[in-house]
Image: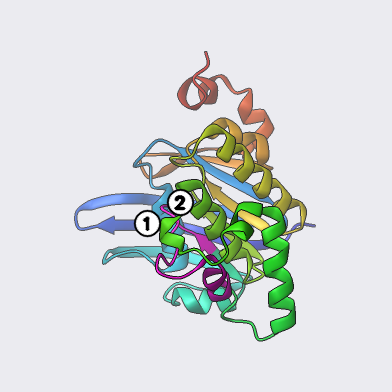
């Protein structure tokens, strides 16, 4: 029997007169890797920001439940304490802090210093480039290195649910491959992942289930592998006919 870790019902988000999300239902079960795909402006990032309470002034309606509790209205730092972390689009690293300091910020809810140090070494093992540059200011890193750092920083909080917003955006093909390798590794470790991603093919290959969004609505949902072979998905999102 699966257990919901995230449940969204009737989510609507409006910026002034613009309805960005028009009534979305979405469920993520513990241990799943779920992807949310769709064109630019479909409302994918808005959903992640609604979950984390990081939207600008707007009207949010509907129900958002995490680990069986409503979380609408909670601050993002409160969600981190509840083991929900997000890697935002654009990475959002602390540019004037070193790589090591960024990782320590990811562990701000923890006080187990020996385990924190061990986790830093663990992620340095996954991302050797970060170890080589551990004292370097994060703002001087390449886009790919910043993405590595943003992911490692989020994982330092030991999340039970990890939200990833466009992790491959603007990265070289070899770096995209590395990021998706880490996403699969994180999922295999039992961390639940909700992935928003424009590279639909890689996202569907990695995911268990998928939701397709168009113009603020979920238009398809189901098994990710089956969607890879769906003619409509192939034509619209995979560049295949």
Q: How many marks?
A: 2
- Secondary structure under tag 2 reads strand
The reply, left or right, for residue 192 in relation to residue 142 is right
Does the segment drawn in magenta span residue 238? no
Residue labelled with disc 1: 12
Residue labelled with disc 2: 24
Mark 2 packing: few (<14 Cα in 10 Å), some, or many (20+)?
A: many
Q: Residue at x 45, y 64 (%)?
A: 137
Q: Residue at x 64, y 82 (%)?
A: 110
Vertical order, 181 against 5 (above or below): above
Vertical order, 88 against 216 (above or below): below
Q: Residue at x 58, y 64 (%)?
A: 134
The reply, left or right, for residue 62 in relation to residue 167 is left
Q: Residue at x 50, y 65 (%)?
A: 64
Q: Which residues are magenta?
A: 86-106
Q: Are marks 1 and 2 in contact (CB under 8 Å)?
A: yes
Residue at the outermost left position: 17
Vertical order, 83 against 109 (above or below): above
Vertical order, 201 against 54 (above or below): above
Q: Position of residue 63 (x, y in %)?
A: 47, 65
Q: Position of residue 44 (x, y in %)?
A: 43, 48
168 vs 25, nearest the viewer = 168
- Secondary structure under tag 1 reads strand
């Amino acid at each position: 029997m699966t257990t919901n870790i995230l449940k969204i019902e009737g989510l609507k988000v409006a910026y002034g007169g613009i309805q960005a999300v028009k009534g979305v239902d979405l469920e993520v079960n513990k241990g799943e890797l779920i992807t949310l795909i769709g064109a630019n402006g479909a409302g994918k990032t808005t959903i992640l920001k609604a979950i984390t309470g990081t939207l600008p002034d707007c009207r949010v309606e509907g129900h958002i439940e995490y680990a069986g509790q409503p979380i609408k209205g909670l601050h993002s730092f409160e969600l981190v304490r509840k083991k929900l972390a997000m890697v935002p689009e654009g990475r959002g690293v602390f540019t004037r802090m070193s790589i090591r300091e960024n990782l320590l910020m990811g562990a701000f809810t923890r006080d187990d210093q020996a385990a924190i140090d061990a986790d830093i070494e663990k992620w340095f093992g996954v991302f050797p480039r970060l170890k080589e540059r551990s004292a370097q200011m994060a703002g001087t890193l390449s886009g790919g290195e910043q993405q590595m750092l943003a992911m490692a920083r989020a994982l330092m909080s030991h999340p039970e649910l990890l939200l990833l917003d466009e992790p491959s955006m603007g990265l070289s093909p070899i770096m995209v491959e590395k990021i998706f390798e880490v996403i699969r590794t994180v999922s295999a470790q039992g961390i639940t992942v909700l992935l928003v991603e424009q590279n639909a093919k890689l996202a569907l290959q990695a995911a268990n289930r998928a939701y397709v969004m168009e113009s603020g609505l979920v238009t398809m949902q189901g098994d990710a592998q089956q969607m890879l072979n769906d003619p409509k998905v192939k034509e619209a999102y995979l560049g295949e006919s």
